Image (cartoon, coloured by chain):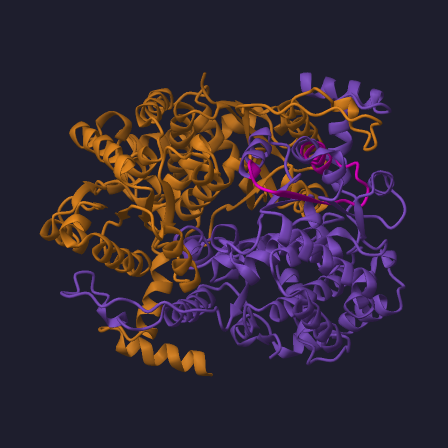
Chain colours: A orange, B purple
Amino acid sequence: MAISLNEKYLKKFLSDSEVDKIWPQVEAAHKTIYEKSGYGNDFLGWVDLPFNYDKEEYERVKAAAKRIRSNSKAVVVIGIGGSYLGARAAIEYIKSPFHNELDKESPDIYFAGNSISPAYLNGIIKLCDGKDLTVITVSKSGTTVEPGIAFRAFRKILNEKYGEAEAKKRIYCVTDKCRGALKKFADEQGFETFVIPDDVGGRYSMFTPGGLLPIAVAGVDIDELMRGAKDAAERYSKCDKDNACYRYAALRNILYRKGRSVEMLVGYEPALLQTAEWFKQLYGESEGKDQKGIFPASAIFSTDLHSLGQYIQDGSKIMFETVLNVENGGDDYYIEKVCGDFDGLNYLADRGMSEVNRKAYEGTVLAHTAGNTPNIIINVPGMSAYDYGCLIYFFEKAAGISGYMLGVNPFDQPGVESYKKNMFALLGKKGFEDMREKLEKELGE
Amino acid sequence: MAISLNEKYLKKFLSDSEVDKIWPQVEAAHKTIYEKSGYGNDFLGWVDLPFNYDKEEYERVKAAAKRIRSNSKAVVVIGIGGSYLGARAAIEYIKSPFHNELDKESPDIYFAGNSISPAYLNGIIKLCDGKDLTVITVSKSGTTVEPGIAFRAFRKILNEKYGEAEAKKRIYCVTDKCRGALKKFADEQGFETFVIPDDVGGRYSMFTPGGLLPIAVAGVDIDELMRGAKDAAERYSKCDKDNACYRYAALRNILYRKGRSVEMLVGYEPALLQTAEWFKQLYGESEGKDQKGIFPASAIFSTDLHSLGQYIQDGSKIMFETVLNVENGGDDYYIEKVCGDFDGLNYLADRGMSEVNRKAYEGTVLAHTAGNTPNIIINVPGMSAYDYGCLIYFFEKAAGISGYMLGVNPFDQPGVESYKKNMFALLGKKGFEDMREKLEKELGE
């Protein structure tokens, strides 16, 4: 079963002819990608990655994951942005947000190096205490501050716990093929390394070892994940109006040009929470530039119907919703019957929560569209690794198409450097002395 | 030390005279609250709650928390929206997001009844397996679907585990004073009950037993929390231009009227994540009505500088940031020196991460304001229960003032009912038959 789009709840907001009218832009974007003729064309490696990934390395990923699973009770994945969001999102979706607590066959997986909070790092260190430990560090350069600090911390812990020789066998680096400080250091030290290809950016790196190794360590069948990605890559390679992925790109651009500046990604399973974070990076970073772009937000329903629901229903009409409708969410729970029916819920007794959740979804879509918030529905068959591979590729391809339709380079992120440069200057890093003086003056004013 | 506002980074976007010009609206909102003359004036109980809460009941909260801490290894807090967000946010801020894993003196605290996902409920049930268990259910009516299903599930578990007599001693209900299905049932069964006052809405209920009991169970000194709330209530009771809380309300209204439709609450500590969720309910539900209101979003930096940072820096100029600048984040971590300096980070060696985090904050504020995103800075002295009490009251009071300035009723949430009614109809609840037919037709079209 493939991902499908339900456009029924858009009828009130746009017509089929609007899709026709914008379609030449979809075709142009498609051409730009396949002819590699646009801005950012050095970063199109993700397009065919599900076909032409390095098969030998892929087997090494699986072997490493097997080894780590057999000799570790805790695994710290060090990375920031695209170097951790994909793995985290996949593990929570395919396994469970309670993976660490409930899967006693797999090591606990912690994400570090994605924050400069000492409280957070101290917390992760304590969580690893007394557990056999492996470290996977994911960084093209190896010089980024956040993962750099964490890598120093955990390498010290490994060295103290196991001695340098054994520690070296417990450090895996996913990094540049030949350049960069981390690659050089890893080769000197003898850490096993894996490659993030030059032409794949961080937010498009789920199907590189940066995503695959931690996902495999969690016990996910990555063959199935890749099979899903491959099927999706085939399915969405043709530019016709049945291409759900391209239609999604078209629809969100139409809504944006009608003044819908916020896209809220909505799911009805808490297991989608981190997928929404991954989505927000993919779309925010691909499109938020040149003073343009849809602002990506997210919510988990029905939870957040009791927080953001009021706003979506009756607030400013600046948003549209994209609903991830997972058709099969896994094991059900049947509602208890209660003698006396004190809470008036016996009409739900012996029915599955999945049915109630489905009715909440249907009721919400009808309520929100009646309240003038457009809803794009993306039907996802289930929560398997295969389904997830399809979904991730769907969003990646749509982001590329959508970004070109918006008229930006979907594959750079120049704005991310601004805060870093300021931070370097304020920290007194060499080469930033002039800037430091200027910034400290601004802060002092 | 009190919360303070830093308006320095707004200079480019608004002038002092704009605050002067809007101030009569602040005064009018203040008057509306204290004269109880506005829409929603039946729900102003939160204003003086830090002074006139029920002292006898408060002692019972502390006694119950002590009892629960002594006889339970897991506590399930059942509630949705304002009935869980406050407690969860406070525990993560004051204790830690790793509270359950790291504080072995306190019971694990799980939040249920805030979702209709069977996977989520099944997960929480498994997490409680084999642990001595208490259930705290927080619901004015007791008939809300999500907490209702969870309460049925966990009452059955308690009954099977302990027998009905002992189970009754392990169920605590925070509910209406005399009305409502839950109050009636609790009295029949002999569960200990606590009161959510009639004039305090869910999103303003942190300082009622709905927030206080779970917070106290986590081992937080709620006397300190209430002392902070009381000091803030005094501090923000006068309508003058030194009132930081009122100024914040004024500033966000000015920015909104200049076209800034999204407010992003930003923090540099992962421990602020759930506080941002609480904030989003408070502001989204108070202001998102009559097709108006600022859309509340959130981010944790530097983490999300590597996902949403690009958008904030260079994307559509529809937002402003409100930065929670926590001046003392707790225990530090000192960065390791590395022989050879392979990653070029030795200039940070032996310095605290808190210093690096501070420079990231300063560098980001300068970068984002240079990129034309206004930044309101709220300085919060620390992460104690006292600091948190101040902060929560600050936001509550500002939401009331701000909502009246916007011209809405800040204390109702009529839009939340829309999805519920649809869901009831689609589930075949009695009394909704006509609606069901209509909705099913819409779905089937």
Q: Quadrant of residue A341?
A: top right
Q: B127 and A227: which one is in front?
A: B127
Does B92 appear above or below A271?
Answer: below
Q: A208 and A47: which one is in front?
A: A208
Residue B424 placement, left or right of A25: right
Residue B388 placement, left or right of A385: right
Q: Which residues are magenta?
A: B128-155
Residue that appears at 35% across and 68% down: A423
Q: Quadrant of residue B237?
A: bottom right
Residue B282: % across, % down: 68, 55
Residue that appears at 80% across and 49% down: B193
Residue A281 visible (yes or no)? yes
Residue A280: % across, % down: 46, 44
Does A258 appear above or below A145?
Answer: above
The answer to whether residue A46 is magenta is no
**Count of all numbered marks drawn on residues in the image:** 0
Q: Quadrant of residue A438?
A: bottom left
Identity of the residue furthest to the left in this view = A188
Q: A437 and B398: which one is in front?
A: B398
Residue A314: % across, % down: 72, 44
The answer to whether residue B132 is magenta is yes
Q: In the rendered view of the protein, which quadrant contains the N terminus of chain A?
A: top left
Residue B275 visible (yes or no)? no
